[in-house]
Amino acid sequence: MANVEAKARKILIAVDEGEESLYALSWALSNVISENSKDTIILLYAKPPRVVYSSLDGTGYMFSSDIIASMEKYGHDVADCVMEKAKRLCKDLHDVKVETKVENGDARDVICEVAEKLGVDILVMGTHGYGLIKRAFLGSVSNHCAQKVKCPVLIVKRPKSVA
Amino acid sequence: MANVEAKARKILIAVDEGEESLYALSWALSNVISENSKDTIILLYAKPPRVVYSSLDGTGYMFSSDIIASMEKYGHDVADCVMEKAKRLCKDLHDVKVETKVENGDARDVICEVAEKLGVDILVMGTHGYGLIKRAFLGSVSNHCAQKVKCPVLIVKRPKSVA
């Protein structure tokens, strides 16, 4: 790339449990990130806040603390699993630093806040971002972030043929 | 970039009369496009359809054909001027092919249609896309395209400090 060799960029990549975000990561690795650059990749996973679990229950019945604890545990396991998969995709990078970040909160807020706070050079994301629970909002996370963050945003969709 | 040397990509870059789209082009040249790659850049300008000029007149008075002709001429001149500026930014590319395309129509439709028809690998755009006339719809073109096109979309905003 023309002027990039000298400049170390911070590249924020939002990952979630959907295959689409890992596809977005792979695409960015092949198309935007030079394996010999001094870039830093920050893999970000937003863990849904507890209120999402509670709101799953439409009966008005409150979950017992045991159930909440095991859901929290499940949330941790999912985060670990997603990060492991994502890091595996990055294993062939030489000089590129790979960092991971798990934050609690609504993906839309978390992604925008981290992008802002770290002053990243580019945000990469799939069109999902909420995982399975909020598929009804398909695409709304990337739309929201594309409007709100100040840095360039790369939105990568998984082609149908790969699905 | 990892696997890019061998693969020639088609990169569609939507340009308009706003400085922001030229900033998006520059950013893509520095960050996504290798100057020695076999990539093809397609610079696309969407010329607003005639109905946009007519609707400028809120009095119900129809423009005379002279005025419409000179507005058409103005439209051509703007297209030429934008393309010249854009091509100048691309002048240092060695093996990269640069093509230009001017299409009549609503930017949202034109960009999506061309992306689809040419089967491009990535669409690059600023957050504008309508030029001055439709600033009220600021951002809507990129949102629309990001939702509709199947390829990865890179949305580049012009940082405030450059403005």
Image (cartoon, coloured by chain):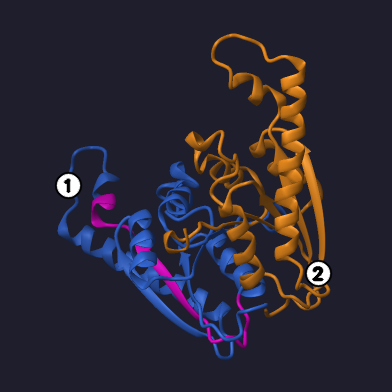
Chain colours: A blue, B orange
Q: Residue at x 45, y 50 (%)?
A: A147
What's the mark number on residue A62? 1
Observer-nearest residue: B93 or B85? B85
Where residue A122 sits: x, y (%)?
50, 67
The residue lying furthest to the top in this view is B60
Q: Is residue A142 left or right of residue A104?
A: right
Q: Is residue B115 visible?
A: no
For the residues labelled 2 and 1, say whether their Cβ atoms are less than 8 Å apart.
no
Where residue B105 sits: x, y (%)?
72, 33
Where residue B126 sits: x, y (%)?
57, 52
Residue B113 lies within the magenta run: no
Judge whether B73 appears above or below A36 on screen: above
Q: Is residue A80 left or right of residue B45?
A: left
Where residue B78 sits: x, y (%)?
71, 42
Q: Amino acid at mark 2?
A: Val
Residue A47 lies within the magenta run: yes
Q: Is residue A156 left or right of residue A118?
A: right
Judge whether B111 appears above or below A21 on screen: above
Labels 2, 1: front one? 2
Q: Using a 10 Å C-alpha cutoff, classify the residue at mark 2 as few (fewer than 14 neighbours), some (14 to 19) or many (20 or more).
A: many
Q: What is the chain identity of the residue bearing mark 1?
A: A
Please, what secondary structure does the residue beneath circle 2 have?
Answer: loop
Q: Is residue B139 left or right of residue B153?
A: left
Whole-Å distance between the Cαs marked 2 and 1? 61 Å
Observer-nearest residue: A27 or A7? A7
Q: Amino acid at mark 1?
A: Met
Observer-nearest residue: B136 or A23? B136
Total number of numbered discs in the rendering: 2
Q: What is the chain identity of the residue bearing mark 2?
A: B
Residue of label 2: B96
Please, what secondary structure does the residue beneath circle 1 have?
Answer: loop
For the magenta stretch, what is the residue range? A33-53
